[in-house]
C-alpha cells in the first residue's frame, strides 16, 4: 500500500511540472516502440534527461534518453515482447532526430543489447526456459508529434 502511495505522489509531482517537456510518437521496429508497431510517451526529467514508456502490438518498454545535441540522443530501453523477447530485453540506443530533438519530425535509430534466449519458437512448439543470454540488435523509425 505504501508503494502505491509513493508512486501516486511521484505521478502527481511529474504531472504538475509545467516546465517539463513531453511528447508522443508513433513508429515501428524492434524495442523502441514496444514491439513492431506502437506508440511512445516521453517526458522530461531534467534539462537533457528524458524518461519514456512505450506500448506496442506485441509488448511494452520503459526507457531513458539523454539529449547529446539537437540531432542525437543516446539511451537505454528495457521491456518485453511476445514471441521475441518474452523474458525481457535491455538495449542501448542511438537516435537521430531529423528536425531536432525538441521539434516534431521523423526519428530513426538503432539498438544493441541482450535478451534471454528461450529458443526461436513462435507458435505451437515447445519452448525451453533457460537463463542464457543472447545478443540482439534492432532498428526503428518513427514520427514525434
Image (spheres, rainbow, N blue to C red):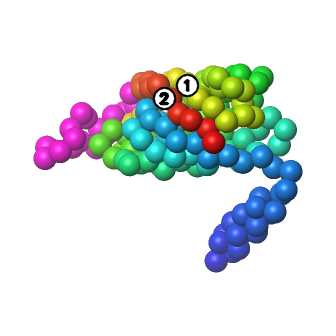
Query: At x 67% / y 36%, what residue is drawn?
Result: 104
Principal secondary structure, stretch drawn in magenta? loop
Q: Which residues are magenta?
A: 117-134
**For the residues bearing labels 1 and 2, Cβ distance under 8 angstroms:** yes
Does residue 121 belong to the magenta stretch? Answer: yes
Residue receiving disc 2: 140
Q: Is residue 71 above or below residue 31?
A: above
Picture quadrant of residue 25: top right
Q: Position of residue 135 (x, y in %)?
A: 42, 24
Q: Which mark is residue 117?
A: none
Q: Nearer the viewer, residue 76 or 22?
A: 22
Q: The N terminus appears in which quarter of the rendering?
A: bottom right
Query: At x 65% / y 23%, what residue is drawn?
Result: 98
Query: At x 65% / y 72%, what residue is drawn?
Result: 4
Seen as rendered, the residue at the extreme left is 124
Q: Position of residue 57 (x, y in %)?
A: 38, 48
Query: At x 39% / y 27%, what residue is drawn?
Result: 134
Q: Is residue 136 above or below residue 53?
A: above
Amino acid at each position: 500500500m505504501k508503494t502505491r502511495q509513493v508512486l501516486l505522489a511521484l505521478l502527481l509531482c511529474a504531472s504538475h511540472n509545467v516546465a517539463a517537456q513531453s511528447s508522443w510518437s508513433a513508429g515501428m521496429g524492434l524495442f523502441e516502440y514496444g514491439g513492431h508497431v506502437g506508440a511512445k510517451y516521453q517526458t522530461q526529467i531534467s534539462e537533457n534527461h528524458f524518461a519514456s514508456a512505450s506500448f506496442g502490438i506485441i509488448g511494452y518498454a520503459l526507457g531513458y534518453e539523454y539529449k547529446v545535441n539537437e540531432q542525437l540522443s543516446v539511451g537505454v530501453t528495457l521491456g518485453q515482447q511476445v514471441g521475441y523477447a518474452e523474458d525481457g530485453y535491455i538495449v542501448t540506443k542511438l537516435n537521430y532526430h531529423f528536425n531536432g530533438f525538441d521539434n516534431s519530425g521523423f526519428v530513426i535509430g538503432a539498438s544493441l543489447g541482450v535478451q534471454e534466449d528461450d529458443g526461436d519458437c513462435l507458435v505451437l512448439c515447445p519452448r525451453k526456459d533457460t537463463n542464457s543470454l543472447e545478443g540482439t540488435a534492432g532498428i526503428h523509425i518513427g514520427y514525434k508529434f
